[in-house]
Amino acid sequence: MYTQKTYLKDDFAVVDSVVSIKKRETARKVLVPDNMAEIFIPVSGRCQIKPFDSIRHTTLHLDRSCFLMPRRRGVELLLDEDAECLVIKVSPLFARGIAERLDQLAIGIYDLRVSEFPRRAINRFYLEDDLWAINEWVSNAFFEELGLFEYNSTILDSIDQIKQRNGNVSVKEIYSSLQVSKSKLEQHFNREIGLTPKEFCMIEKINCFIKLYLEGNGHSLTELTYLCGYYDQSHLIKDFKYFLNTSPKRFLKALEGMIVN
């Protein structure tokens, strides 16, 4: 279904990981909400991106790639028969800095024209498992003028807290520990990432649930619910309805061969 390369273990790396998506058994893939920004680069064929909360499709082909801000809703990825697409996961620290350099195609989706040479080079780096080369390309492409380390320290510290606890931290705990106001924290998040701190936490929790399920440790759905910090199954169901427009049971039933993290 998809292949994900090793993560880059560096808080200041622009690129977090790279995913390759191919049609395989089904032409329709459902991508779960993600706190990472993403660069979609078609390697072959054509594919379309459709956010759950939109009726518009964004078509990608060899002459058109796109950049997605961190997204609060799942998206559908529709692939032609021979289509393959690389998805470069980008740290949310640098999401706004990249988006500001691009033309908007739809809400949260930006036009990223990648010439033949970079597209082939990026695909080669991926096949060679050289994520640092991809990281260098993305860094040079978007941060040559500003400098790589122009990041928001409040966002960095907030994300670190949220990820360390898999989203099981209150917004009050975050802004209190950072000694900033709630409005200041939310202002930073909305401006830099396009999500609220609460949404960022919720997305971490729902991805924690999916990850633990995929690990197959024999936990029941009820056990997974509590392991991921949900008070009860009704809260889990509510989050699935909001982010993926479906129930946990339907999601897990369709998981094999369809869902990409």
Image (spheres, rainbow, N blue to C red):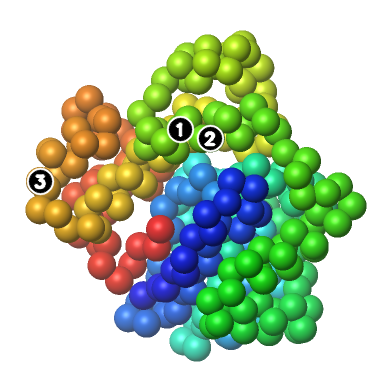
Q: Is residue 67 above or below residue 117?
A: above
The mark closer to the camera, 3 or 2, is: 2
* Residue underneath mark 1: 162
Contact, mark 2 vs mark 1 (Cβ under 8 Å) = yes
- Label count reads 3
Picture quarter with the C terminus:
bottom left
- Residue at the image point whose x is 52% and y is 16% from the top: 177
Mark 2 and mark 1: span between their CA atoms? 5 Å
Q: Is residue 236 left or right of residue 70?
A: left
Q: Nearer the viewer, residue 80 or 43?
A: 43
- The amino acid type, in three-letter code, at marker 1 is Ile
* Residue underneath mark 3: 220
Mark 2 secondary-structure assignment: helix
Mark 1 secondary-structure assignment: helix
Mark 3 and mark 2: span between their CA atoms? 29 Å
* Residue underneath mark 2: 159
Residue 17: x percent and y percent? 52, 62
- The amino acid type, in three-letter code, at marker 2 is Ile
- The amino acid type, in three-letter code, at marker 3 is Ser
- Most extreme residue toward the front is 9
